[in-house]
Image (spheres, rainbow, N blue to C red):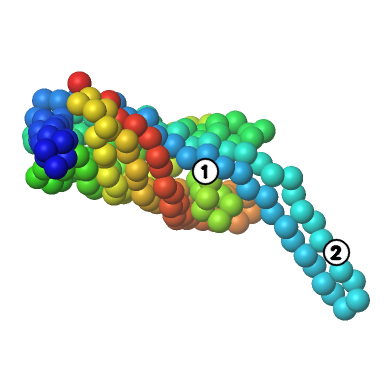
């Protein structure tokens, strides 16, 4: 019983000291991402005629790099650089300026957070909003960035990070010729990111 009390006291003291990491003047570097693959299958039937097609699996990776600075206790300016690489395609990029608020929980090493921001990129969601496919050589696509998640401190200067991230991309395309036309697109992307954060 005495050993259990000692272990509990150490964990309690550690969690209290770890909470200092989300205070004014601190820096945070985060790297997170998600990896996977996708394939498609289609079947066509017309009367007695049937056909099907199944694609090969294609691998992809989404990476997010975020340097952060705590403006006041809990409130962090956290710009983000996203890169999406889809097998056999050029990578796409986006950059956004975000504000994140980290909620302190007394005597806990878990710090929930929410974030919001806006940025630009050269990609739009494709494949049922799962991936970002490059659609421009310019950074001219507006992106609304929202998220929520938690940082779980594993040491004084390091935490595991899990986050739900939502991005809304919008862009216009104009066509000229005999008739001029304009198309406006808005697309939504949802993803779960896993990573680590280092504090300085």
Q: Can residue 67 be seen in this view?
A: no
Q: Name the residue under label 1.
A: 132
Horizontal side of 36 relative to 31 (left or right) equals right
| Other-residue count near label 1 (Cα within 10 Å), few / some / many at <14 / 14–19 / ≥20 | many
- In the rendered image, the quadrant that contains the C terminus is top left
The residue at the point 56 percent across, 42 percent down is: 36
Q: In this view, does 146 lie to the left or right of 48?
A: left
Pick whichever of labels 1 and 2 is earlier in the sequence: 2
Of residues 53 and 1, the one nearer the viewer is 1
Residue 96 picture location, percent across and down: 33, 36
The image position of residue 110, as x and y in percent, is 22, 43
Residue at the (60%, 56%) spot, across then down: 179
Residue at the limit of the structure toward the right, as seen here: 48
Residue underneath mark 2: 51
Q: Is residue 89 left or right of 63 when viewed as pictured?
A: right
Q: Where is residue 57 in the image (x, y as percent from the top left)?
A: 69, 44
User: What distance separates the C-alpha of mark 1 from that of mark 2?
Assistant: 30 Å
Q: What element carries label 1?
A: strand
Q: Quadrant of the N terminus?
A: top left
Q: Could you tell me which secondary element the residue under label 2 belongs to?
A: strand
Tell me the residue at 63%/48% (across/down): 38
Front one among 134 and 69? 69
Q: Is residue 168 above or below residue 31?
A: below
Q: Which one is closest to the eye, mark 1 or mark 2?
A: 2
Closest to the observer: 124 or 183? 124
């Amino acid at each position: 019983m005495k050993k259990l009390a000692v272990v509990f006291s150490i964990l309690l003291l550690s969690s209290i000291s770890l909470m200092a990491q989300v205070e004014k003047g601190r820096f945070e570097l985060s790297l997170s991402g998600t990896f996977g693959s996708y394939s498609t299958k289609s079947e066509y039937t017309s009367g007695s005629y049937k056909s099907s097609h199944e694609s090969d699996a294609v691998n992809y990776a989404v990476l997010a790099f975020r340097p952060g600075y705590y403006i006041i206790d809990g409130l962090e300016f956290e710009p983000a650089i996203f890169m999406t690489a889809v097998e056999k395609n050029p990578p796409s990029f986006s950059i956004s300026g975000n504000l994140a608020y980290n909620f302190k929980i007394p005597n806990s090493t878990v710090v929930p957070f929410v974030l919001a921001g806006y940025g630009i990129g050269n990609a739009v969601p494709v494949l049922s909003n799962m991936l970002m496919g490059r659609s421009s050589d310019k950074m001219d696509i507006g992106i609304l960035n929202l998220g929520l998640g938690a940082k779980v401190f594993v040491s004084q200067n390091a935490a595991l990070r899990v986050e739900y991230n939502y991005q809304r991309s919008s862009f216009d395309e104009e066509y000229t010729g005999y008739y001029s036309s304009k198309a406006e697109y808005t697309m939504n992307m949802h993803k779960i990111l896993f990573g680590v954060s280092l504090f300085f």
